[in-house]
Amino acid sequence: MKVSNMISSKGHKIANQFIVEGATFQPDHRRIMGKMFQSFDSNIAFISKHVHGLPCNIVWLDRFYWDYSVTTGKYRNQFLNETKKETQAKIASGEYILTGLNG
């Protein structure tokens, strides 16, 4: 597992905003590998890298924290490479899955 700070548009490390490569998530008793965006101590978004029997790049968002603050939103957008409006549309369409990423 590798943890690194998010990087600002000016190339600086951002405190309390992390990407965790090699993270695992276990929905429905399946262990899924991928990368996690973490803001402070909260898991915000998870993107699958390898799922047996499922396509890669499935996105799960924490149902409570995905839109917790302006700062979280700024770096969530960077992590997902999209705007909040695009994220909301993908939630509404079912492309992104809201779930509990924090226990």
Image (spheres, rainbow, N blue to C red):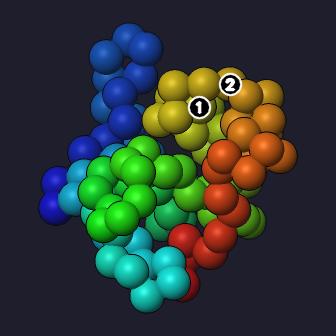
Viewport quadrant of the N terminus = bottom left
Q: Tag 1, which secondary structure?
A: helix
Q: Give, as a three-letter code, the residue at label 2.
A: Thr
Q: Nearer the viewer, residue 59 or 71?
A: 59
**Viewer can see residue 91:** yes
> In the image, is 71 to the left or to the right of 102?
right
For the C terminus, give its image quadrant. bottom right
**At x 30% / y 51%, what residue is drawn?**
49
**Which residue occupies the extreme left position in the image?**
1
Q: Find numbered disc 2 in the image and state the secondary structure of the residue it sits on.
A: loop
Discs 1, 2 touching: Cβ within 8 Å? yes
Q: Quadrant of residue 13?
A: top left
**Viewed as shown, does residue 65 lie left or right of 54?**
right
Q: Residue at x 73, y 28 (%)?
A: 86
Q: Nearer the viewer, residue 64 or 34?
A: 34
Give residue 22's quadrant in the image.
bottom left
Tell me the tag on residue 50: none
- In this view of the protein, which residue sits in the foreground, 53 or 80? 53
Residue 20 can be seen in this image = no
Quick check: 37 left or right of 83? left
* Nearer-the-camera pick, 60 or 37: 60
Task: Identify the residue at horizontal 59%, vertical 31% (top origin).
Answer: 77
What numbered label is drawn on residue 83? 2
Q: Earlier in the sequence, mark 1 or mark 2?
A: 1
Residue furthest to the front: 53
Mark 1 crowdedness (10 Å alpha carbons): few <14, some 14-19, many ≥20: some
- Vertical relation: 47 (above or below) 79: below
- Whether residue 65 sits left or right of residue 32 in the image: it is right
On residue 77, which mark appears? Answer: 1
User: x and y percent of residue 84 in the render?
Assistant: 73, 31
Label 1 – label 2 distance at C-alpha: 6 Å
